[in-house]
Amino acid sequence: MGTLTATRALALADPGSELSGVAHFAVGGSSISLGMPAEGLRHLGIAAELASDAVSLSIGTRPRVHGTAWSAHAHWLLGDDDAALSASRNAIELARSIDHPYNLAVALA
């Protein structure tokens, strides 16, 4: 999903809603992939705040696990190795706590 499509989804979602969290996840991931890691981190942080622990994204992962793992990559791209390591460990710990193999694979990646 490109940033334009993700931004449109964000504009359509009710602010503060679970769908808004999914849209923030999409904007965050797209931003990181397009070379805007600081912007991506901001959106992934919002996505994590709005995420429900019970909901999996349409791609099969829980937003908090996937978003935290993706945040680790953004921190690393920004040169913040300590934050990257912390986010990575948090994603792995969360994935292990829910005992879901695919979420764990995403966190480990």
Image (spheres, rainbow, N blue to C red):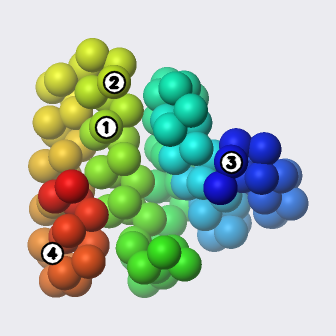
Badge 3: residue crowd in 10 Å (few <14, some 14–19, many ≥20):
few
Res 104 label: none
* Camera-side mark, 4 or 1: 1
Q: CA distance from mark 4 to mark 1?
A: 21 Å
Badge 1: residue crowd in 10 Å (few <14, some 14–19, many ≥20):
many
Q: CA distance from mark 3 to mark 4?
A: 31 Å
Q: Which of the two labelled residues, at mark 3 and mark 2, occupies the earlier sequence position?
A: 3
Quadrant assignment, res 86 = top left
> Pointer 3: what residue?
2
State whether residue 63 is above or below residue 81.
below
State whether residue 63 is above or below residue 2.
below
Q: Which residue lies at the image location 44% right of the left edge and 65% below the top edge?
A: 63
Badge 4: residue crowd in 10 Å (few <14, some 14–19, many ≥20):
few
Type of amino acid under label 2: Leu
> Pointer 4: what residue?
97
Q: CA distance from mark 3 to mark 2?
A: 19 Å
> Element at badge 2?
helix
Q: Position of residue 54 (x, y in %)?
A: 43, 83
Res 73 label: 1
Q: Are marks 1 and 2 in contact (CB under 8 Å)?
A: yes
